Amino acid sequence: MERLAVTHDHTSGSDDPSMTPVGAPRLIVLSGPSGVGKDSVIETIRARAPWVWLSVSVTTRPIRDYEVDGVHYYFVDRAEFERRAAAGELLEWAEFAGNLYGTPREPVRARLAAGQPALLKIDLQGARQVRQALPEARLVFLAPPSWEELKRRLVGRGTDDEETVRQRLAHAQEELAAEPEFDVTIVNHTVEQAAAELVGLLSPQATHR
Ligand code: 5GP
């Protein structure tokens, strides 16, 4: 496993929005503890590297006011989610905080078959399932700069009661322990740096393994 840091050379030019990568198809799975900033990294990639293809997950979670159906997620009810899971339409799925989340299989397959890279942002349970289903996938762990920083981010969300915060921290500690299962760690010092490193992994020049 390699640990990319802020000093990692990510000057390959792959974050040039005009560039479409060619070469070996890559499936990159971004995961990491809750609160580490996966969503911010993904939003930065949406803005800075629009050529990056992001899988759109299906979820039973209620839509948030800034979200767009079909962009951030496909929002479905539990019966529809279960139908899709039973029909084998999901590459992986997991329950997270009482809601179901899954990756539609066909768009990922089509993307890789066309020789184009794909990026999935999913939880740890999902990352493990992708590892089983597609061993060639590259699993990327987004790590906080430190435990203290992650704690600050998790507690800093504000309004939750003590028990909820305690549970969240315990869960985060378990999630951090999964790092050795991953191929690469990106330390989220800044969103920009983490996003650039992730984009670098999607490009054909990225040969670390
Ligand atoms: P949120 O509700 O905050 O958007 O996401 C909650 C968690 O679900 C995050 O850790 C997110 O990465 C994860 N997640 C989102 N989509 C998927 C998916 O398709 N599969 C799995 N296993 N987890 C997902």
Image (cartoon, helix red, strand yellow):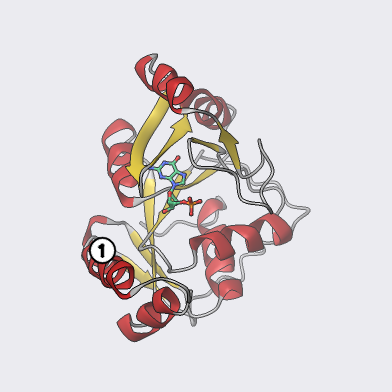
Residue displayed at 55% across by 78% down: 190
**Residue 110 locus on image (x, y percent):** 56, 25
**Front residue of this view, candidates 208 and 189:** 189
Q: Amino acid at mark 1?
A: His
Say if 101 sits above or below 189 in the image: above
- Classify residue 31 as left or right of residue 108: left
Residue 118 makes an appearance in the image: yes
**Front residue of this view, candidates 188 and 1:** 188
- Classify residue 22 as left or right of residue 104: right
Q: In which quadrant is the C terminus drawn?
A: bottom left
Q: Secondary structure at mark 1?
A: helix
**Residue 148 locus on image (x, y percent):** 34, 85
Residue displayed at 37% across by 61% down: 32
**Front residue of this view, candidates 131 and 22:** 131
Q: Quadrant of residue 69?
A: top right
Residue displayed at 34% across by 41% down: 95
**Front residue of this view, candidates 19 and 190:** 190
**Residue 27 locus on image (x, y percent):** 46, 42
**Residue placed farthest to the bottom in the image?**
148
**Residue placed farthest to the top in the image?**
87
Residue displayed at 35% across by 79% down: 151
**Residue 177 locus on image (x, y percent):** 21, 65
Q: Quadrant of residue 39?
A: bottom right
Residue 14 makes an appearance in the image: no
Residue occupied by mark 1: 171
